Amino acid sequence: MKKKSSIQDLAIFNGTPIFSEALHVGRPNIGNRDKFFARINDLLDRRWLTNDGPFVRELEQKLANYLDVKHCIAICNATVALEIAARALGLHGEVIVPSFTFVASAHALQWQKITPVFCDINPMTHNIDPAKIESLITPHTTGILGVHVWGRACEVDALSAIAKKHNLKLMFDAAHAFACSLNGQMLGRFGDAEVFSFHATKFFNSFEGGAVTTNNDALAQKIREMRNFGFAGLDTVVEVGTNGKMSEVSAAMALTSLESLDEFIAVNQQNYLAFKRGLADIPGTCMVSYDEEEKNNYQYIVVEIDEQSTSVHRDLLVRILHAENILARRYFFPGTHQMEPYRSYFPNAGLVLPVTEKLTQRVLQLPTGTALKQGDIEKICELIRFSFAHAEELQYQIERR
Ligand code: T4K
């Protein structure tokens, strides 16, 4: 990296980025290509391309074993998986969900005319705050949808107790949380059902894909039927269903990813530790950290920037990083309640979401994964440190432009 010794050396001023090729958040990890291509040959030879094929079945079995859960039903993506699981659980009316999540969590409900009722989060965990749930329960509430944000588990015991007390269903959006644990048990076995995403941007991917996991036999059966138009036999349709099937190509990719899972996690962990070292002690910043007692996928390098104690606002830092070709993201900005249709439906939702409102202004996600090259993280950290060291000067220059 050409040393940035004055702020005029920043690409935001002189147009010359540190990285000639963009570094993306969510760059996919790719497993062994030969094994993947061999699987593609197999499925072509078999002429079995989708509809509960052998790769899908193998994947479901392997994932259920890995997660130590009775049933794993592979689905075409996590959004459809959330929709199917919510429907199979009989959710209707209102469901309590955090706003600090990807918009798909709420959309999966709204798509079925279920009203998402947004709940605030715990500022330490970024997950739904159990203490704020009960005041949101009404006679129309039928469920709670927790999200294990950044792969860090929700307070499952507290949520289960509330669900039990009020006779509500409890579901988890575990899109971020494949290969993560709570008290040593893999996520995937909690609540009535959990939903994973294997989208390309997730550390373990099947191009597009997802799964519902559950220990409930009847629910699993229902989800399998709903995934396949409601078919319960060759000519028998027992209820309304959709097309939520995973293709064999996706399952082939997932099986190949699974073989490299340990490597992906190890690389993510090394990256996470390198970012921790590189960003340590920058006043006004703090990195989301993972509990080393648990299993983690270390996929999310999330920095919180406290606008009170530094003059580098998160959005200015994003501009600086983007100019240098480091395509940091503001997940989850501006919060689901600020997106349509929720913004119009609930214009005052922000009043009861103070922690969410604050966090969406502060978070920043940095690139990680196997696509990063040696030295990239050090360059990113050096740039961030440099930006903070020259905060006031930078602010002054930007305002003058
Ligand atoms: N619940 C939660 C908590 C979630 O985070 C998500 C998905 C879901 C539910 C729903 O899961 P799925 O139905 O998708 O299975 C991306 C992903 O599309 C989405 O899956 C993910 N969360 C979300 C957090 O991120 P966008 O709109 O931000 O994607 P996009 O196109 O801007 O790409 C993100 C970054 O990844 C870019 O920097 C480019 C890079 N990228 C992306 C793809 C697809 C690549 O480098 N290669 C690629 O192939 O939503």
Image (cartoon, rainbow, N blue to C red):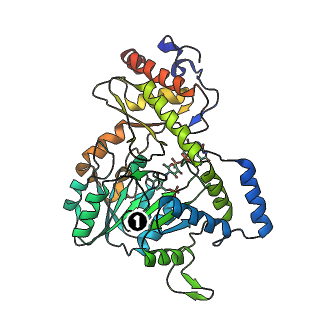
Q: Position of residue 237 (x, y in %)?
A: 55, 86
> Which residue occupies the foreground of this view, 75 or 14?
75
Q: Position of residue 89 (x, y in %)?
A: 39, 74
Q: Is residue 112 visible?
A: no
Q: Position of residue 71 (x, y in %)?
A: 49, 69
Mark 1 nearby-residue class (10 Å; few <14, some 14–19, many ≥20): many
Q: Is residue 238 visible?
A: yes
Say what amino acid the circle numbered 1 marks: Leu
In percent of the image, x 31 and y 31: which residue is there?
306
Which residue sits furthest top?
5
Q: Is residue 206 above or below residue 267?
A: below
Q: Secondary structure at mark 1?
A: helix
> Which residue occupies the foreground of this view, 183 or 152?
183
Which residue sits furthest bottom?
235
Q: Is residue 396 above or below residue 366?
A: above
Quadrant housing the C terminus? top left
Q: Is residue 67 left or right of residue 338?
A: right
Q: Kindly identify which residue carries mark 1.
A: 109
User: Residue 159 falls in which quadrant of the image?
Assistant: bottom left
Which residue sits furthest left?
135
In percent of the image, x 57 and y 29: which residue is there?
325
Q: Position of residue 60 (x, y in %)?
A: 57, 65
User: Residue 19 falls in which quadrant of the image?
Assistant: top right
Q: Is residue 115 above or below residue 152?
A: below
In percent of the image, x 45 and y 57: which residue is there?
104
